[in-house]
Image (cartoon, rainbow, N blue to C red):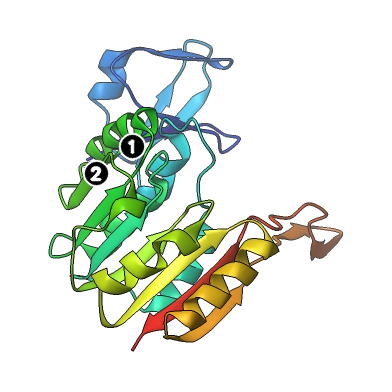
Amino acid sequence: MMKILMNDKGKKFLIGTEDLHTEQGYIKQEEIASSSPGDVLKTHMGREFHVLEANINDYIQLMDRRCSIILPKDLGIITAYTGLGSGQQIVEAGTGAGAATIFLGNLVGENGHVFSYELREDFSQIAEKNVKGFGLENVTLKCQDVVEGIDEENVDLVFLDLPKPWEVVEQARDALKSGGYLAAYTPYIDQVKLLTRILKKRKFSDIKSVECLVREIEVKDKGVRPKTRMTGHTAYLTFGRKV
């Protein structure tokens, strides 16, 4: 079980093997290690920290990441549009820090599997550390160029977080089972246009592209309104189905 600490402002801290030092004081590692979810620990300055069992969102938010990651709003759209579930097989290209890898591995469960390709060795090493830290055993990380080929066959989803996803469309089609999906995460509309053209050429069906924008609601005693800041454009999500 993984634990985190949360202060009265909602800031979260991933528990390590050393004392926790914050601007609100410190807590000894021995006290943290012996605590359980639901406990309240106090710093030497008397500030309270709640002990919580970490969920996947807590872990991804606090894990080591030296590149941008795909946000929950986009991961949720990918899941919903492709019908992902327990036991499915996924090929991912563009592992990065491993945020989507961990999300997808957690989603398909122990009977499913995620095969993730990353060209950069430094990113692959970070992702390996993060995947192991979350305790997933259904993920295989590959430090190799997906353009050169996909080893897996009969998979349910090929997810591409690449600058030029159209270079992998043919390989993805070969790897997908009949009815399987290709999904691509691309920041620019020109990428969407070219990818859509290639998907049509390779006889993919049900091709669509979407953008997800999320705005929280601000609730105060004097009134309720949308927040002035929002999570706007991150990328376009393009989908195609092999038939």
For mark 2, what is the residue? 141
Of 198 and 68, nearer the camera is: 198
Q: Which quadrant is the C terminus positioned in?
A: bottom left
Q: CA distance from mark 2 to mark 1?
A: 8 Å
Q: Is there a contact, CB below 8 Å, between mark 2 and mark 1?
A: yes
Identified at 69% across, 60% down, the residue is 216
Quarter-wise, where is residue 82 in the image?
bottom left
Judge whether residue 85 can be spotted in this image: no
Residue 131 in the image, given as x and y percentages of width and height: 27, 40
Task: Specify the farthest residue to the right.
Answer: 222
- Secondary structure beneath disc 2? strand
Query: What's the amino acid at mark 2?
Result: Leu
Quarter-wise, where is residue 110 in the image?
bottom left
Residue 57 in the image, given as x and y percentages of width and height: 43, 49
Q: Which quadrant is the N terminus positioned in?
A: top left
Quarter-wise, where is residue 81 in the image?
bottom left
Residue 173 in the image, given as x and y percentages of width and height: 32, 73
Of 148 and 224, nearer the camera is: 148
Frontmost of labels 2 and 1 is 2
Residue 111's tag is: none
Query: What's the amino acid at mark 1?
Result: Ala
- Secondary structure beneath disc 1? helix
For mark 1, what is the residue? 127
